[in-house]
Each structure stands twice: as C-alpha cells, then as structure tokens.
Image (cartoon, rainbow, N blue to C red):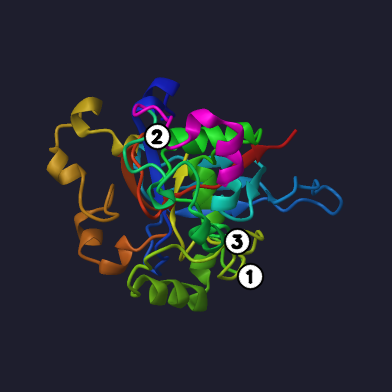
Amino acid sequence: MKSTDRHLGMWAVVLVALACCGVLSARVWTSWATPAEGEMPEPPSGMQYIAGGVYAPFFKEESAAQPTPVAPVYLDIYPVTHAQYVAFVQANPRWRRSQVSPLLADAGYLRDWQADFPPPEAASALAQRPVTYVSWFAAHAYCRWQQKRLPRSAEWEYVALASETAPDGRQDPGHQARLLAWYTLPAAAIPPLIGSGQKNYWGIYDLHGSIWEWVADFQTAFVPGAARGDKESERDRFCGSGAFGVSEQERINYPAFMRSAYRSSLRGAYTVYNLGFRCAKDLP
C-alpha cells in the first residue's frame, strides 16, 4: 500500500544493503525487461538507465505478495556526497544546520559538519564520501532541487539484487560470498569513499557495503497489526532484524535474515551516522 504525503510526513522507509543468501522464499522472484538495441535512452549526467521489470519483495504478507511492476527509471550511480550536499545548502539556506526546522531534521542533522558547512580541515576528506546524518525530509528536498526524486523501495530493491554480472545476484555464489564476508566485518567509523566497491550489472555502485539509504515510500510491512485489524500481537509481527513477514521455520534459519533488502523504519526527521541517500528520476 502506498502512503499519502501525510504518512510520509510521519514515517519513511530505510533500506540497508546487508547481504543476499541462498535460502529464499518462492515468493521472491524478479523478471527483467531487456531493451531492444537502440531503445536505451541516454541517462542524465551521473545516473544510469534501469530497464523495467517485475519484482515481488520477500517482506510482504502472503495475501499482499502480488508482483510489483518496476517501470524503467534513472538512478544515481553513487550516493549523494558531502560535496554535492554542500552545494545544496549553499543554494538553500533553510537546510543549513543553524536554520533547519526541528520538525524536518533532529538535533543530529549534519553532525559531522559541526557547523553550517564542513570544517576546512575535514572538507577534503569528506567531499567524496556519502553524506549522512540527513533526514528523509532533507533527502527529499535535495532530490527535488535536482529535479529528481527519492527512489521507491521496489526500485531500490530491484536494482540492489544485481551482482556485478547479472541482474539477479542470488544466482551468483561468489557474489553472495562477498556480501556475507562484508557482513561479518565491523562497521567503519565513517562511510567509505563512493565507488569503493564494484559496480553492479546496472552500473550502480555502493548499494552494498556502504550506507543505509532513504527511499520514498512507506510500506504496509511496517504498519502495526492493530492498524490493519490483525489479531496477532505486534510482538509476533515485528521481529528483530529482517524477520518481517517470515514463517517460524524461516525465523530459525539464520541466512534467511540476511537480505539485500533488510529494512527498518524511522521517523522522517531522524538522522543516523550511516544513513544517506541517492536520487532517482522518471523517464520523460
């Protein structure tokens, strides 16, 4: 179920790229449309063209697990960097640390900048790293300023499934092993430079092994059961880690919790040290 703007004002969805695993429900499947020769449009600078297809997310209840069409879209090759976000706040003073409304960003907003702009001694080190400590509202405003938008969750997951050589990385044991190896490493103090890893099949970097990323839409998987009229308790509905909507048998299978689409929900004004974003753009 898609949210209204009012819902987005209260909540947004975070996707975190953790890892793929070999044990997946039969409900998870994806098909891709391959554009004919000469049909692929030229993407805007800094973006890649993503061919459309059909995707059924794992984290949906059985009754809601209908195929989700994903239309062709442009997606930023890299997450938005500190340098790019500096240009945004220079052009839009209302998004500076000293001026942003507490309704739109919490007290942690751009915490690593320490002021309205990064300190000179840190500016060069941060410039080509993903900007974090940004709220959903700030990410949304940045993308609009760029005449873009935040990607929808289905778009993000659809692209994040890809390995370096195939649109469905679940069929690539080497790709899964690399993601699992990354998952065992301690979190870095600051995000790595953009493009530190390999680009995937679509030509997109850093969907795995870098940061969490805001997406545009709110999913019913995060609506409390009582709000939907469900009889089971929220304790059973909202499990730890990525266990939303999985069976008891799947809960005890540890690899089933390590997904490319591990999710959490936060209020739209929250900021986190490893939470950033990238933008998408509809085709003309």
Numbered tag placed on residue 167 in the rendering: 3
Q: Mark 1 = which residue?
A: 165
The crowding category of the residue bearing disc 2, from other C-alpha atoms within 10 Å (few below 14, some 14 to 19, many at least 20), is: many
Give the magenta part as a residue range: 85-103
- In what quadrant of the picture does the N terminus appear? top left
User: Where is 264 relative to 269, above or below?
Assistant: below
Q: Secondary structure at mark 1?
A: loop
In percent of width and height, residue 70 lies at 58, 42
Residue ID for mark 2: 218
Q: Earlier in the sequence, mark 1 or mark 2?
A: 1
Residue displayed at 45% across by 40% down: 66
Picture coordinates of residue 159, whole percent (x, y): 56, 54
Q: Position of residue 76 (x, y in %)?
A: 63, 49
Question: Which of the two residues, 211 or 31, is positioned nearer the viewer here?
Answer: 211
Q: Is residue 86 left or right of residue 237?
A: right
**For this view, does 34 lie left or right of residue 238?**
right
| SS type, badge 2 | loop
